[in-house]
Amino acid sequence: MEKQDDWMEDPDGWLEDGGRRKKGDDRFLKGVLTGVLCSLIVAAAAVWGIYFLRPAGGRETGPTEARYGEIGEKLEMLKGMVDRLFLYEADEGAMAEGIYKGFIAGLGDPYTVYYTAEEYEEMMESSDGEYVGIGVQITQSESTNLITVIRVFRGSGAEEAGLQAGDVLYKVDGEDITGEDINNVVAKIRGNAGTAVHIQVYRDSVKDYVEMDVERRDVSMDTVEWSMLEGGMGYLQITEFDGVTYEQFVTALEDLKAQGMKGMILDLRDNPGGRLDQVVEIADDFLTEGIIVSTKDKNGLGTTYEADEELRFEGPVVILANGNSASASEVLAGALKDYDKATLVGTTTYGKGIVQSIYPFDDGTAIKITISDYYTPSGANIHGTGIEPDVAVEREKSGDEEQDNQLDRAKEILAGEMR
């Protein structure tokens, strides 16, 4: 197998608390408990997977190898019971995939995942920024495993069907997906262009479940949005870091500069992260020298990514971030903050300071595995703590969707820095 580029986050989603439950809604609670139970069952399947790693014969059997032997005997007993008693026909392929998934799930790391061939293909398509799907960005809570919509793409089947940010996914084509790994859910939602998938969500604003049929379409993800504001301020939002992001960033930056941008508000709020190569390229455009980010694995080895002399923008920058700004977003925010190239406004970031890498196998399957910590230029590892803002501003709740007090504060700060 060949090693792929490092990834700072799942292309199809990330982990953050976002799901909410209506008090007293037993049906929803049942779904959560069922999902947790399913996760435990899958994790238990890990012992079957360990059997296949049993060392070859010819060596003295130690305590670990003896344990492998016990596991092998238990598996033989379980298989015998399935053969004799199981009412339905067993799907050996699905059972095998369950072994591999359970083995990796047994590590207890939500970022280390085994992918079937279909899941891996789907994930690689989405990481390039172009894929067939319903057109949403989703997140999975680390504490509850609930999957929540955080963005609906313009012109997508999801937008047309009425899916909304904040909707909690409950069923896909009638199947309860509560507690499933986010990549498995994405695989269930994906399909051929022109076909539809039936989605059921829990919508907190109406305290009830909502169902809809959503058409799958070709989706080209716009990961960068921009506009000119008053007084020479440019606004540039990056929603995630996919294969198309740096190219879109350069297009946006050059357009804003052509319109007379003197200072930039860089909005990384709710950005779950993505590809390391893309965020390093973007950070490099704000820096002339120095470390952008460095990594260190379990053996103390790693990689250091440094800026070159080329500079695309040297004006003042204010970064907007919040508790949903994770991974690659924190690489960018951390680098510019450490070099005093930007003022960070908002709330403390998510705190994902680890790197995953994807390793494909010859049969089309793959594993995404946590391989190292990463460090900001100052040498800080922000895993579990996040990056604190220079100016703390909590987002105010308002019925007016146009009201954005964090953005208003960023404008005030940038205006002062541009004088």
Image (cartoon, rainbow, N blue to C red):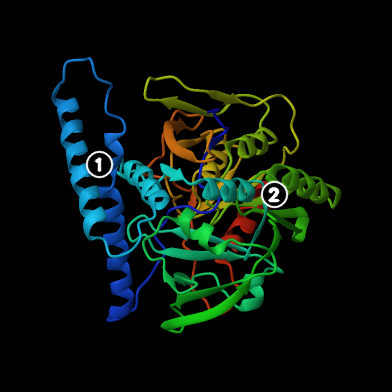
Per the image, the residue denoted by label 2 is: 264
Q: Amino acid at mark 1?
A: Val
Instruction: Using the image, determine if residue 385 lies above or below residue 223.
Output: above
Q: Secondary structure at mark 1?
A: helix
The local secondary structure at tag 2 comes to strand
Q: Residues within 10 Å of mark 1 (few under 14, many from 20)?
A: some
Is residue 387 at least partly visible in the picture? no
Q: Is residue 137 left or right of residue 86?
A: right
Return the x and y of residue 258 as percentages of the image width and height: 86, 48
Judged left or right of residue 233, residue 201 is left
Question: 298 or 364: nearer the eye?
Answer: 364
Please, is residue 303 above or below residue 181 in the view? above
Please name whichever residue, 249 or 190, is drawn nearer the observer in this view of the structure.
190
Q: Dot 2: few (<14), some (14–19), or many (≥20) neighbours within 10 Å?
A: many
Question: Where residue 249 appears, x then y in whole percent?
Answer: 72, 46
Give the answer, above or below, for where 357 lies relative to 120.
Answer: above
Residue 117 visible in the snapshot: yes
Q: Are marks 2 and 1 in contact (CB under 8 Å)?
A: no
Q: Which residue is mark 1?
A: 47
Query: Residue 371's spot in the image, x, y percent?
Result: 43, 31
Residue at the image position 69 percent from the left and 49 percent from the top: 264
Q: Residue furthest right?
A: 258
CA–CA distance in space, label 2 to label 1:
53 Å
Tell me which label, 2 or 1, sits earlier in the chain.
1
What amino acid is at disc 2? Answer: Met
* Farthest front residue in view: 84
Residue at (58% x, 61% y) in the render: 190
Q: Nearer the viewer, residue 259 or 253?
A: 253
Of the pair 159 and 180, the residue shown nearer to us: 180
Q: Position of residue 246 (x, y in %)?
A: 70, 42
